[in-house]
Image: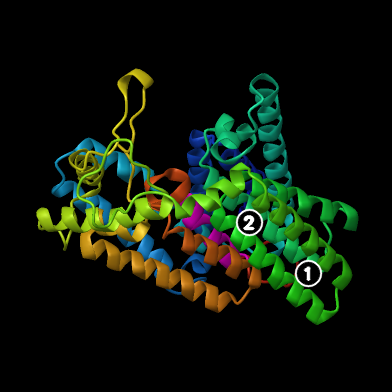
Amino acid sequence: MNRLQFSNFIFTCLPVVYSAFFLSIFCGLRVMSSTCEGVILGLTLLLALLDKGHFIKSRKSNYFVIGCIVFYFLQLLALLYTSDISVGIVQIEVKITLLFIPVSLYYSPYLTEKFRNQLMPNYVTLMALVMLFCFCKAALKYRVSHDNSVFFYYSLVAPLGHHAIQFSIFAFIGFIYLMERLRKRSFFINRFFHFFTLVYFIFFIILLDSKMVIIFSIISILIYIGLSIKKGFFKRRLILFFILCISILAMLFITNNPVSNRFKDLSNGVNVIETNQFNPGDYFNGIQFRLLQWKLVKEILTEHSAWIAGVSPGDAQHLLDKKYISLNMYVGDEGRKSHGFLGYNTHNEFLESTLQNGLIGLFVFLVICAGFIQMLVNNNDIEFWLIGTLILFYCFLESVFQTQYGVLLFTFFPMFLYCCSRKDPDGKPSISGS
């Protein structure tokens, strides 16, 4: 087999590898996801060996890629001053995606618009099937318990061991792809099935019950309606689709159900900023808990004189747990096998980076975000803007680098959408990717 035949074989395998990668993400098969990451990196390196000139010249410096690499090496350096090396090594293993994904995708010659159009229907189909599996499992539970909460939020994706908000963002990516194809009048199978799939995805986004993703979905529908009306496409159908979505949302918020309860929950709870002692029974909603983290991170960094380099990824969670205990917050019940707030991170990647790696870590993470925004500006694509903005906003609500799929969500999809914006003039893959 000569070089050209070998490269063509690799190009043939790539859609299969990426589809397996998507399936592993949706199903929560973490070992399979890690394996696919390694295979993608390996294939990129093989293609680089086949065409060294393209590998060297194909890309300019990118702050996002550079920032991810530097941030990862900060985790390695933190091993020099951590008091818990074992936890520090676990953090390094979780964050290895910061090296694999940006390098694999940014220097890949095959990521073109044609490749994305070939791959994304597989993404939507696999996501739809996995969501259907979750719904069927919930229906079986409902037959036994008659508890409608099994259809919502974490309970819905519990069979996969998934993070409900991350899963809803994966669903949002598929939803935006369908909206973009609708805007371009490129239907998924046919017009009727395309609209049905759109309703199917927005239905599951509502069930997954992430306030952030629901709000972004409404904004996205409004934006696409505006763009489509401007061009004169599907004016009537899109307005009817929007009215349908708003009617469903209005009914949800008016009635008493898990979705409306999570929005109403934001107005309940205790005052956390000025309180120095709590009762184990005190309740914190999402906003209050995150506000408390600002106070705790400041105290920890000051007490340990760690503003410059942080307390290390190995020690950060242990020190947070000590704060929860000292504040008399609920720390679990051995009889119920509950850990309470123990193990809860800062739920904000800006805060988490500062706590673990100090102002140096915060600066590097800001460089990564600057590179992210630079890609958005250079790409100038509405699909990438909507998905990218949601992912950046998510960093204010979750410590994305603390879980494998959080890191993957933050690195893979921005790089994939950005790199796939390239055109493929002759419509055929080659070693040089042009």
Q: Is residue 349 magenta?
A: no
Q: Amino acid at mark 2?
A: Ile
Q: Residue at x 53, y 42 (%)?
A: 36
Task: Classify mark 1: helix, strand or loop.
Answer: helix
Residue 83 location (% of width, % of height): 14, 41
Specify the segment rendered in magenta.
407-420
Q: Amino acid at mark 1?
A: Arg
State whether residue 156 appears in this view.
Answer: yes
Q: Is residue 411 magenta?
A: yes
Depth check: give the residue in front, 126 or 145.
145
Is there a contact, CB below 8 Å, between mark 2 and mark 1?
no
User: Which residue, as the protein is rendered here, is positioned at the far bottom?
Assistant: 230
Q: Residue at x 48, y 34 (%)?
A: 31
- Left or right of 380 in this view: 202: right
Residue 10 location (% of width, % of height): 63, 49
Residue 183: image tag: 1
State whether residue 1 appears in this view.
Answer: no
Q: Reply above or below: 119 against 70.
A: above
- Residue 114, by quadrant, is bottom right
Question: Which residue was labeled with disc 2?
Answer: 173
